[in-house]
Amino acid sequence: MSSANKNRAGSRSLLVAGAGIPGLSLALALKQANGPALEVTICDPGLSAGAARHRGRAFAVAAGPRRMFERLGLWERIAPAAEPIRDMVITDSRLADPVRPTFLTFAQRSAEDESRGEPFAHMVEAEAFVDVLLRAGAETGIGFEATGITTALPERDRIRATLGDGRDLAASLLVAADGGRSRLREAAGISWVGWSYPQSGIVATIAHERDHEGRAYEHFLPSGPFAILPLPDRDGRHRSSIVWTERQADVPALLGGSADETLAAIERRFGLSLGHIELEDGPSAHPLSFGIARRFCGDRLALLGDAAHVIHPVAGQGLNLGLSDAAALAEAITEALRLGTDPGAPEVLRAYERARRFDTVAMAAATDGLNRLFSNDALPVRLARDFGLGLVDRLPGLKRFFIGEASAIRGAQPRLLRGDAL
Ligand SMILES: Cc1cc2nc3c(=O)[nH]c(=O)nc-3n(C[C@H](O)[C@H](O)[C@H](O)COP(=O)(O)OP(=O)(O)OC[C@H]3O[C@@H](n4cnc5c(N)ncnc54)[C@H](O)[C@@H]3O)c2cc1C
């Protein structure tokens, strides 16, 4: 058996299964803070495809996680692929309605009161984002293995993992960042409370005639939300990303026709405010589900990102939860290493779970509730939600609360999310 820490007597080691954005961010934060005192290896069969497998995806990254990347010295490299959301307009209507009345606006002026002049989120293109993280990982001395972890066996003072190519690696702690269907979570016997939504999330990149001026739109339509999110211009073209929630049963009819028919279906929802539109990338449809692990840790095992929780994309918060996990776990592990204690010890993992549990359950419940409230055309429900949104728009205190939640900067946050060093 080889060991991830075999070369350096006294050093500790960490194995991360999953090179998604949360797994990579955790590894980078830990390697930067601890240098040779911690050896970090990331395993993922998808690494052989590099960042290209993320082409066409973009994520809203909230202010808190953005501060973490600033602190890690990476934001400057990510920024060319990022567009600040300066303004957000929320409407509630039926597809056939000629006008979509605005119920709620989050202008940047309000966000400034709340978060030191920062936009509450940036849209970041995933391919460039992951490319920066992979390069920074190689520069920092993280080990990469382009293979999955198939089994993991905890022992007294380490955990032994078997890779897809048959090799064994040992580490003080294994982090399962292997996505919503986490094989490592299941193998550890950690149960999962969850369900599938009868909806799919359709994502695409749209080029449009007019400048979006940093404005995002969320149109709540009866089958689910349709979000238009600003991207940076490329090759002189104005661009936005769409996240379009539809009933799963309707997706084949909506996307199965010719390119012109698909574009026409998008156009009906997108509206005319940005002028003529063209499809630049996609569309691709993703079945939507909800799930939360009963525990975020096991024996020398920590769950991170979607392996711990999967939420509806209505508020663009799934990745942000995973990045908050990375900040909290990096803090717990670094504290243990500074005290000279074992980073895989139960008390370290419990500290991580305590830091993340409440925030995660609250966000999961809020996004589930929001989706149920808005993916509904019954008249009493429409009236109730329209009254609710109008109320929020008129009460600055309530609005600030919502913006604080969307920025992931409220309450007792991990140091990195506040922009502080580990
Ligand atoms: C339509 C849609 C839109 C979204 N928009 C947003 C948004 O705007 N903002 C936001 O915050 N969130 C958003 N999300 C949520 C976001 O996509 C996820 O929360 C995030 O991608 C989860 O990252 P992850 O790395 O935890 O999991 P994944 O992205 O699933 O990555 C898991 C990784 O683990 C690897 N892996 C799997 N098995 C193994 C194994 N056995 N060993 C090693 N590696 C393994 C896989 O190859 C993969 O690279 C959206 C989701 C959807 C569906």
Image: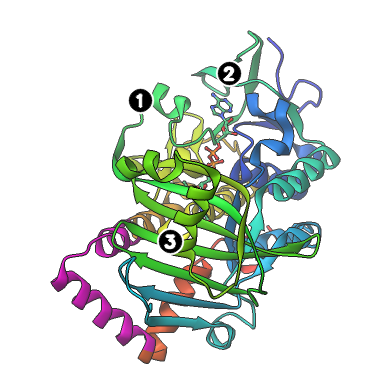
95 above or below 215? above
Q: Which residue is mark 2?
A: 161
Q: Which residue is mark 3?
A: 226
Task: Respond yes or no on whether mark 2 lies under 8 Å from ligand 1.
Answer: no
Residue count near mark 3 (Cα–Cα under 10 Å), binned few <14, some 14–19, many ≥20? many
The quarter of the picture where residue 421 lies is bottom right
Counting residues from the start of the chain, the first of labels 1 and 2 encountered is 2
Three-letter code for the amino acid on which mark 3 is drawn: Phe
Is disc 3 placed on a helix, strand or loop? strand
**Would residue 277 be found to the left or right of residue 288 on screen?**
right
Is disc 2 placed on a helix, strand or loop? strand
The quarter of the picture where residue 21 lies is top right
Q: CA distance from mark 1 to mark 2?
A: 16 Å
Counting residues from the start of the chain, the first of labels 3 and 1 encountered is 1
Three-letter code for the amino acid on which mark 1 is drawn: Gly
Q: Position of residue 320 (x, y in %)?
A: 53, 56
Near-viewer residue (366 or 82) = 82
Q: CA distance from mark 3 to mark 1?
A: 37 Å
